[in-house]
Amino acid sequence: MSGQDHSDIQSHIRTYMLVFGALAILTVVTVGASYLEVTSGESIFIALIVASVKGSLVASYFMHLISERTMIINILLLTIAFFFVLMFLPLMTTTDASQILQ
Amino acid sequence: MMVMRWQLAYPETPVPFIGEFLWENGILLPEVYNSLGAMHGTIMIFLGVVPLAVGAFGNYFVPLQIGTIDMAFPKLNMTSYWSYFVGGVIMVASFFTPEGAARSGWTSYPPLSVFEPGQTLWLIGMVFLITSSLLGSINIIVTIVQLRAPGLKWMRLPFFVWAQLVTSFLLVLAFPPLEAAAVLQLMDRVVGTSFFLPTGLVVSGEMVAATGGGSPLLWQHLFWFLAHPEVYVLILPAMGIVCEVIANNTRKPIWGYKSLVYATVFLGFMSFIVWAHHMFMTGMGATMSAFFQTTTMIISIPSVVILTAFFLSLWGGSIRFNTPMLFALAFLPMFGIGGLTGLPLGLSASDIPLHDTYYVIGHFHYVVAPGTIFALFAGIYYWYPKMTGRKMNETLGKLHFWPSLIFMNGIFMPMFIQGLAGISRRLWDGGAIYSHAADTLWLNEVMSVSAWLLGIVQLVFIVNFIYSMKKGEKAGRNPWDATTLEWVAPSPPIAHGNFESEIEVHRGAYEYSVPGRTRDFTPQTEPKKSDN
Amino acid sequence: MEIPYTVEERPDTGLNNSKLGIWLFLASEIMLFGGLFSAYVFLRMGAPDGAFHEWGQELNIPLATVNTLVLITSSVTMVMSWASLKMNEFSKYKLYMGVTLLCAVGFLVIKYFEYTAKFDHHIYPSTNTFMAIYFTLTGLHGLHIIGGMIVMFYFWFPGSKMWQTEPEHFANRIEVLGLYWHFVDLVWIFLFPILYLL
């Protein structure tokens, strides 16, 4: 991020403020949605979508991932792939357990 | 280990020399046997091979082989070392606590591990060791990516550096889930949670006073998510060392360098999705086990590619049979045996009868003991001149190698026979109470005697190591006529900065015996125009 | 001899050492929390229908919402302190870093009240699997907050002398610290809904 002049940073700061606003609003939205009378499946879906949006806002703008070098993006993609492997781990065990019960 | 082998060969006879000081009657107690078994695995893997292969060789030779002055983060390096030190002290100290050391196997399966004494210290020690490995491997990756000397493109890297890079990625991405699991088990033990305890668990005829709702399977998944990549953490640096030694001593470029590199990267990637082949016994369904059998068969392909490339490198070379080369050559069939005996374990139909028998012990010991440890010996003999400025004694080296090779096989080959006969691992009496074991019990004595002899033979190595430091034949900068960058530095390298001047790289890592050149090796630093 | 690329970027990778280092560290952190999230999913699926939701009713949503906002604010002030350095405004940096530190303290204070309220009602990690994973996840997250605070305090006060001698190196360090801090925030963004709202 070297070699930027002040106006560049100024525009960055405007983005940070916008992101801040968006994060605050989304927090309120997700709390509000949890009080709605929806099925648990729907509420999980909403909550995870909102959290993912918030997460990507933080990662893209505060952590500058949106303009980061390809090497770092690649390392993260690899990590995310294995992260999902980890997430599917409980799913795989339980599907099998139900097979045994049948 | 040697004490354990006594118990296995001569069950319930007092252990000579030390037994009478330690236990009543001098007989090894079953609990202590379990502790020794669990700690043998833990110490060998987390305090022995990983620190040696990645911590020591990686730390010393990666900067040298990429032509830079130091690791990228010296302070992080120190943190990593001291974290390792603390973890090691905790592990060893646990033997001397009233509770004794952990005794639930190196895999620490719950629910047993939640109730057995000694486990808490094991977990705390593991957290330190994991942290140490994480910091160390981050350091290695950054060093390789950022500090390569000018001109050292990716495909000019020595294979050892590639192996270290992939290994470090495995450590960075696979170790944290085990750290998470260790934290969960610590919670189970210390504050009474039930992450790994199912509802209605009965221990010694009494209901366990925990809420239940957890599952031991969770631990197994998280544990093997690390522990399978860990296997490759143990073997890849070994392959890297063997590659260096073979290329140097056949005086030929390594065969299929690019396929080696791609195979290694692919191996690293695949190692994350094969872990459940350690868990075919957990009652997993057909879909899951089919998936993991398939991935397990796939992952054997890159291993075979690597091994084949090494074998083909021997073809038509003018091989120098010095001690490092002998160890590297022995690595090939030993790892081959270890790898091929793994195939039946990767298929659930044949794994089920073999599971937890001595066959498994034989299989993975062939990979790590005559496999990785021989490669580490090759590395020590090969790089000793670089580290000390003197060569190790060749005669003593051969005196170390040949008996080691024989006794290694004397220990581990009979394990396959015992395993196929159905003897389980972790038996205090070595299977003496089972009638089906009777035919193969005599092998216990063979293995034990081999183990003690192997131990004695290592004294030759220790003597050689110390003797050569003072009296060894003086070696110059490049005693083996090698091409890679570490041989450009003085022996031993300069304490701060390794090299005398900046390194510039002009060619690939293994330009041996290029036709038309005056010498049979061309160092990587040699400018292109000097060809012919 | 100096280790190359500690401050300036290596031309072919476009990175300096610490940037790559912190991202690798964060990658390992993703896997660490990944393991715990996966444990959460596992336990949730293993629990009786709706039990996790019911056990979660004990938690205090308003306090946690406030805490979320506190942490988001601290993330913004953290990035602002870095931007101030980039614009050569050292006093502003001090201000923003101080506010970030204050937010972190605030977060822990609120967390402390949440924890003690649970203990007062005799709710412990051993109460049920939800509470077990709740205390583990938030506890580990809290440890990350404390770790971040120690580093922040160092760069806020004793370590800030470096600005006089090596401004660019110092700004890089703040950027790296910021990346870590945003990651801690990011983890909380996911912890908040899965623990409190679902």
Image (spheres, helix red, strand yellow):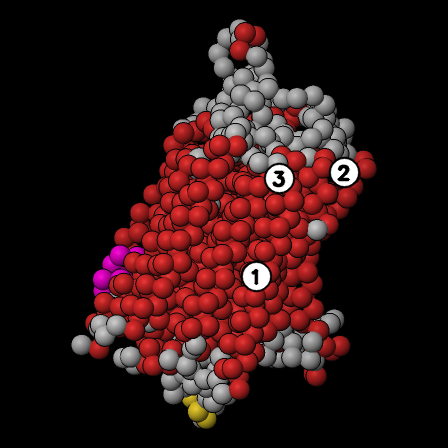
To which residue does mark 1 refer?
C104
To which residue does mark 3 refer?
C89
The numbered dot on residue B468 is 2
Please state which amino acid type lies under the numbered disc 3.
Glu
Q: CA distance from mark 1 to mark 3?
A: 23 Å
- From this view, report whether residue B14 is shown above or below residue B353: below
Outermost residue to the left: A102
Check if residue B290 falls in the magenta segment.
yes
Both on one chain, marks 2 and 1?
Answer: no
- From this view, report whether residue B227 is shown above or below residue B357: above
**Mark 1: which secondary structure?**
helix
Q: Is residue B306 visible?
A: no
B393 relative position to A59: left or right = right
**Mark 3: which secondary structure?**
loop
Q: Nearer the viewer, residue B307 or C43?
A: C43
A99 relative position to C37: left or right = left
Q: Nearer the viewer, residue C157 or B437?
A: C157
**Residue that appears at 71% across and 73% down:** B96
> Which percent across, then down, holds residue B456?
68, 55
Q: CA distance from mark 2 to mark 3?
A: 60 Å
Disc 3 crowd, CA 10 A, few/some/many (<14, 14-19, 20+): few
> What stretch of residues is rendered in magenta?
B286-292
**Residue that appears at 33% across and 71% down:** C198
